[in-house]
Image (cartoon, helix red, strand yellow):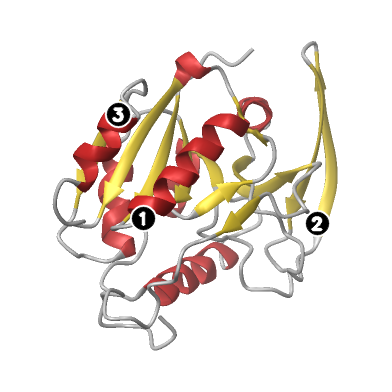
Amino acid sequence: MIGEPCTVLVVTYNRPVEIRRTLYAFLKNVIYPHDKLLFHLADDASPGSYIADIKSEFNFLHWSHTRTERGGWGKNVNTALKAIVTPFVFLMEDDYVANGPVDLETGARLMTNVEQVGLVRYDGLAGHFLTLHINEFVNHEGRIDYCVIDKKSRHLNVYSNRPHLRHKRFTDYYGYYPEGGKLGWTEEAFAHHVRKAPDDSPSLAILKDGIPRRFEHIGKSYQLSGEDVGKRGKSG
């Protein structure tokens, strides 16, 4: 039984339609004690009453938020992570709509009992060239089948910014995201950082249903647009 609270960190910038679809779908599909879920908006200076309107519509949730002034994805998320105190954080962007169960309870139970695992991906690995090592954990609460992602996999993105549940020890070890770069560059730089870590560093995993896509990406990308702030990273 999970006793620890989990903060759902929603990374957002000016997507009033998409974020509502994202939140409603998540609430429909999430598996976690609802009284243990907190919600945090990491906002990079959306205009007008954007944050107030979201909090008003979802006033039955326990909200907090941080704001950066168009500092880019890295600074926005870092600011939020530094403000969050729960041991578990589920990170998702404002345009990822869940299309099936999002079992955070099992992911949290895995990381509580298997301390080597620091992050569980929920985006679905279909189409990625990643090497997986099949494992299991069994105790009085039952069995968890999971796969650890090999950091030496062919594909760069052993780590991805896509939806994932992380334990505090993941952030404590790997640190925060690089700042000052565009979205794509930020993700790639952090993915390289994770891949270079030694074998005994916190590992990344998926649950037994973690290969099929679990989220629909509905938003128009800000990459390479005027809204993609940052000085580094030609790829966005």
Q: What residue is rendered at 22% in x and 47% in y?
A: 50
Task: Kindly identify the amino acid type of the residue bearing the numbered disc 2.
Answer: Leu
In the shown orientation, is residue 30 left or right of residue 71?
right
- Position of residue 176 relative to residue 156, above or below, is above
Left or right of 122? Residue 81 is left
| Image coordinates for residue 236, horizontal then vertical, percent | 40, 80
Type of amino acid at the residue the image marks with label 3: Trp
**Image spot of residue 192 (x, y percent):** 53, 71
Above or below — where is 81 with respect to 44? above
Asked if residue 174 shows in the view, the reply is yes
Which residue is disc 1 drawn over? 176
Residue 42, image x and y in percent?
30, 47
Q: Position of residue 229 (x, y in %)?
A: 26, 74
Give the distance between the C-alpha atoms of the residues marked 2 and 1, in whole angstroms: 25 Å
Per the rendering, the mark at residue 63 is 3
Q: Nearer the viewer, mark 3 or mark 2?
A: 3
Q: Earlier in the sequence, mark 3 or mark 2?
A: 3
Q: Secondary structure at mark 3?
A: strand
**Callout 2 secondary element:** strand
Between marks 1 and 3 in the image, the one whose residue lies nearer the viewer: 3
Residue 202 seen from this side: no
The residue sitting at 69% across, 47% down in the picture is: 205
On the image, numbered disc 2 is attached to which residue?
132
Query: Callout 1, which amino acid?
Result: Tyr
The residues bearing labels 1 and 3 have C-alpha atoms spaced at a distance of: 23 Å
Locate residue 114: give its quadrant.
Answer: top right
Q: Secondary structure at mark 1?
A: loop
